[in-house]
Amino acid sequence: MKFKRVLLRSSVKFHLFLCLSVLVLGCASGAQSRRARDAGEATGESRQLNQVFEDYFEEYLKLFPTFATSIGDHRYDDRLAVPISEEHRAKQRQLYLRSLEQLVQLNREQLEGTDRLNYAVFQRALAQRLDRLNFNQHLLPVRQLDSTPIEFPVLGSGRGAQPFKTVADYDNFLGRIAGFPIWVDTAIANMRAGIERGVVQPRVVMERTLPQLDAMIVVEAKQSLFFQPIVQMPAGFSEADRNRLTLAYTQAVEQQIAPAYRKLRAFIQEEYLPKSRTTFGMSDLPDGNRWYDHLVNSQTTTDLLAEEIFQLGMNEIERIKREMERTRAASGFQGNLAEFSRYLSKNAPRGYDRRDELVKGYQAIRDKVASRLPRLFGRLPKAPFEIRTIEEFRERSAPSQYWSAAPDGSRPGIFYVNTAGIGENAPRRASEALFLHEAVPGHHFQISLQREQENLPRFRRFGGYTAFTEGWALYAESLGGELGLYTEPQQNFSRLNSELFRAVRLVVDVGLHRMGWSRERALKFLMETTMSGESRAALEIDRYIAWPAQALAYKIGQLKISAIRSNAEKALGAKFDIRAFHDELLKDGALPLDLLEAKMNDWAAGQKP
């Protein structure tokens, strides 16, 4: 009850917008009356509002060209922005302020329901982005995940969002490569400024990053991931283009990319590591507590305090462990949970010893789930997805993950599976819970449906909220039984342990960043609570250290979505339709959790006689 009470509490900062959204979602008949009374003005105001959205998004794509590439807009494929530079940050601030000014000049009273919702979402997003610029994330530009040096090789490998189908595509990426040394020089300058101001990464974060940088430092271009597009060059290219591009990419790798990585690596090893922190939490940085509060708010889309999230995590751990105990008792096993987990693993079907075999195991899960999806969903995404293994250079630090499909169909969604250590006498099973989370009906399903909604303004169609997207994906794990999965005991227990992991995150993330926990304490707590080995647990803990508050969104979002479903089931009784519920929940794309709940409450009220 405390979680529900706190989650529904309106933050002071956005009180006006939340009230507005509730009015929007609760008075459709009033909007209809207004349209009938004054349709001309309403339509004109709506056009102006959507022009503000479009102008903003066009400028945003120019500022963030790799984002444009990722959503299938290839006008800026030859550019690599440097968002960590002061010049770029100033342009961001100008865009957000200008858009806010244009927004408040509109008459909200003449906007219809959907437009009012979009207005509220847009205003909140701009305010939050402006707030983010008040903190010093640009002084921490390098980490083992979600940073340019780690993601750029995937972009340039021929397996990411960057297209390599035409000669122009190849020339475009050469232009993008030219921007990488500039990014590196800016990052080094920022990190030096961070040293002066006491804003530095924990040592463990940089130690995780160094091997990934090492993999990019090659003597010969042919050894580089960035040379793979040349290896895979389309057969239709002329001999002159093939020779020109081969030489150009050889020179780009050997004279630009490798030297830039070498320079960054040397700086981190020789200058930055000695100055890096031996502490781990945001609270140890200047203004760190306020910074962490901002991250908590933006990641969870709630006004939950960090301490409340910590307690919520402890409560969820208790609840999930009780469910695990019931599973153990029902099986007749007499030992404790750790012994039960080992027993299930020992008696489960053997896993796979090769990467390609593990991929086939996940493909078998895909085939099984596909036939059952229409039982739970009336609307299915059109975009296909592939299952691949994470590139070896980043598999020691990057978890399994999903990369979204291009809306124009030029690139499928990609479910990346981490296979680190699979060939070292460590057979790996295909995890049903992981598949449901990353692929369908999790990330691929939800994100593809959102991007296929052409009626949404582009800032929403291609935007997202971590609490919604990750909350939905964790909720999707709970649908396995309804989709014919979890019939094998070890898979069902693994699903519970997966949820337990997300509950533990609430505790250790807050513990690290607000309560002064050491890495060792967080590692011990995670290992003992989830029965995980040290290698996996360390990878997780170092992720939370590097990416504060992001891990909070999963459980917070899942709890809210589950509560929304429970409330709808109680309100509608026999009239509750799970297909209609899921379709409504997903049809407007990602929303902050409070706006999502207001929308779904309005929907449920409309289903009653």
Image (tube, rainbow, N blue to C red):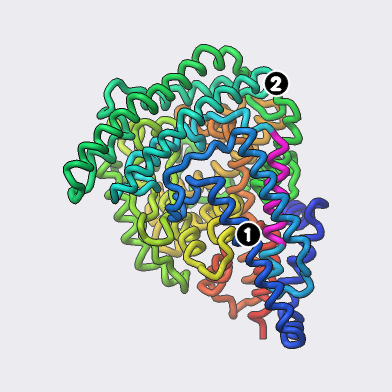
At horizontal 73% and vertical 73% (from top left) the residue drawn is 111
The image shows residue 120, relative to residue 277, as above or below, that is below
Residue 573 in percent (x, y) is at 62, 77
Which stretch did the figure color magenta? 120-135
The image shows residue 543, relative to residue 167, as above or below, that is above
Q: Toward which corner of the image does residue 103 lie, by quadrant?
A: bottom right
- Label 1: which secondary element: loop
Q: Is residue 128 magenta?
A: yes
| Of marks 2 and 1, the one in the foreground | 2
Q: Quadrant of the N terminus?
A: bottom right
Q: Amino acid at mark 2?
A: Arg
| Residue located beneath label 1 in the image | 591
At horizontal 48% and vertical 25% (from top left) the residue drawn is 208
At horizontal 23% and vertical 38% (from top left) the residue drawn is 231
Horizontal relation, residue 443 to residue 111: left or right: left
Q: Can residue 152 be seen in the rendering of this structure?
A: yes
Instruction: Choose the circle earlier in sequence order: 2 or 1.
Output: 2
Residue 425 in percent (x, y) is at 28, 30
| Residue located beneath label 2 in the image | 197
Q: Residues within 10 Å of mark 2 (few under 14, many from 20)?
A: few
At horizontal 41% and vertical 56% (from top left) the residue drawn is 406
- Label 2: which secondary element: helix
